[in-house]
Image: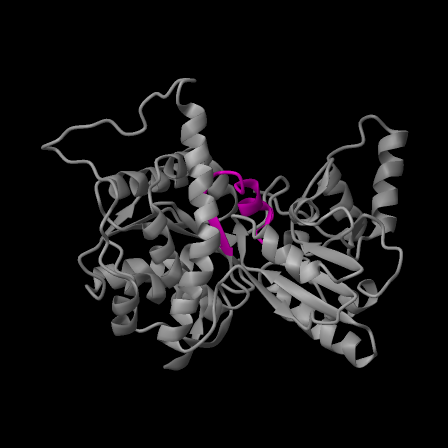
Amino acid sequence: MRRQIEGSRAVAEAVAAARPEVVCAYPISPQTHIVEALAELVKSRQLEPCEFVNVESEFAAMSVAIGASAAGARAYTATASQGLLYMTEAVYNAAGLGLPIVMTVANRAIGAPINIWNDHSDSMALRGSGWIQLYAETNQEAADLHVQAFRIAEELSTPVMVCMDGFVLTHAWEEVDVPGQADVDRFVPPYVPRQSVDPDAPASIGAMVGPEAFTEVRYLAHARQLGALDLVPDIADRFAEAFGRTSGGLVRRYRTEDAETVVVALGSVLGTVKDAVDELRAAGTRIGALGITCYRPFPAADVAAALGHARRAIVLEKAFEPGSGGIVSADVRAALPGSGPETVTVVAGLGGRAITKASLVRAFPAEGLPALTFLDLDRALIERELARLAANRRSGPTAENLLRDLGVVASRI
C-alpha cells in the first residue's frame, strides 16, 4: 500500500522485511534515520530474531557485519561519506571473503573541507572494492533495490552496496509502496550461506594467500562481478513480476530512440535530467537520457547499445578525480567503440549544490562543450583565489578564503 513516508524509513522497513539477523551501524548523517528506524523495529520486536549491535565506529560496523556473515547470519549495515572511508579496509575484506553483506550508502561529499551534503564522492571512492553498486533514482527504487540486493548478494555470495542520495532521498517524504512482509518472504528465500564458520569443523577464513594463488582469487572475484551482469536484470524482472512495478536492472533509457545527444547519469538527478530532456524535446532538440542503475559491475554492453546511434554523450557526474576528470565518463568511453559518439563530462552538484533544470537546459544542447565542464562554476570566485595564491605564498586556507569572499562565516568547531 502506498503511503507518505520518509525515504530513510521506507528503506528501513524494506530492509526489515528481508529479515536480517544482525544489523550493526555507527550513526553518521545522512544515514542515521535508517539505522534508528531499524533499532526501533528490533527493540519493539517487530523485527526478530535480529540483533542490533551498537558499535564504536564505522570500521567496527563492517567488522561486525563480516563476523556475522561469516557465522552464517544475514547481515546489514549502513554508512555515508567519511564513515565509508573509515571502514575501507573492512569493505575490501568483505568482498575478498565473498560475504553477501548488504549496505546502504547515503551518498554524501568527502572532506576536507567538511561538507554534509550530497554528491557521489564516497561510493565512487570504493568503486574498485569488489562490491556490487546499485544507485537509486527515487525512494521507491531505493526501497525496492534493498529487497533485490539481499537476493543478488546471496545468490552470488558477493556484497552489495545500495546507494541513495543523502538528504535528497533519505530525508525526503514522498509516496512509496514499501514492499510488504508476505511479498518479501516469497521473493527473498531463507538465507543459506555458501560458507560459514563451524565450531565443530574449525577453519581459517581470510588466510594468507601468496603469489601462487592470489591472481586466481582476484580473477574469481571479477568473475562473480561479471555474473551479476546477468543476475541483476534477471532479479529485476522477477521483482517486476512479483511486485507489479519496474525497479532495478542495469540501465534505463529515456527518450533515447532517435536522440542525437544522450545524457548519462546516476541517482536522483535523473528526475531533473528527464525534465530538462522533455523541455528540450518540446523545443525540437533530439535528446534523451540513460540512467545507470548498476554501476559495478559496469554494464558496458548495455551502455554501448544505448549510445551507439548518438552523436554525443554527456556524462553528468556528481564526483570527479582531481588531476584526471570524470569517473563514470572513463567507463563510458571504455565501453564505446572508437567510432562511437563524442563523450564529454559535466560535473555538477558537488557538495550538495543545486542542479537546476534551467542550468541543464542551458548546458545540454550547447555545441562545442569542452571535455570537462563544471556546471555553474563561479569563475570570478576562482580567479580571485588564483590571484591571491600567485601574489602571496602565505595566502591562507583556500576554503576559508572563498567563504570570506562570499561573505559567509565558516563554522568554528
Residue placed most toward the observer, 220 or 112: 220
Q: Residue at x 21, y 40 (%)?
A: 71
Name the magenta segment's main secondary structure.
Answer: loop
User: In this figure, which colouring scheme has been used for the structure?
Assistant: one colour
Which residue, as the protein is rendered here, is positioned at the far top? 211
Q: Residue at x 26, y 63 (%)?
A: 41
Left or right: residue 124 compared with residue 338: left
Residue placed most toward the observer, 318 or 112: 318
Query: Can I make out residue 202 in this image?
Result: yes
Q: Residue at x 80, y 64 (%)?
A: 364
Left or right: residue 254 compared with residue 152: right
Left or right: residue 322 compared with residue 367: left
The picture quadrant where one finds residue 369 is bottom right
Q: Which residues are magenta?
A: 115-134
The image quadrant where one finds the C terminus is: top right
Residue placed most toward the observer, 111 or 84: 84
Q: Position of residue 146 (x, y in %)?
A: 40, 60
Is 44 magenta? The answer is no
Q: Position of residue 132 (x, y in %)?
A: 46, 48
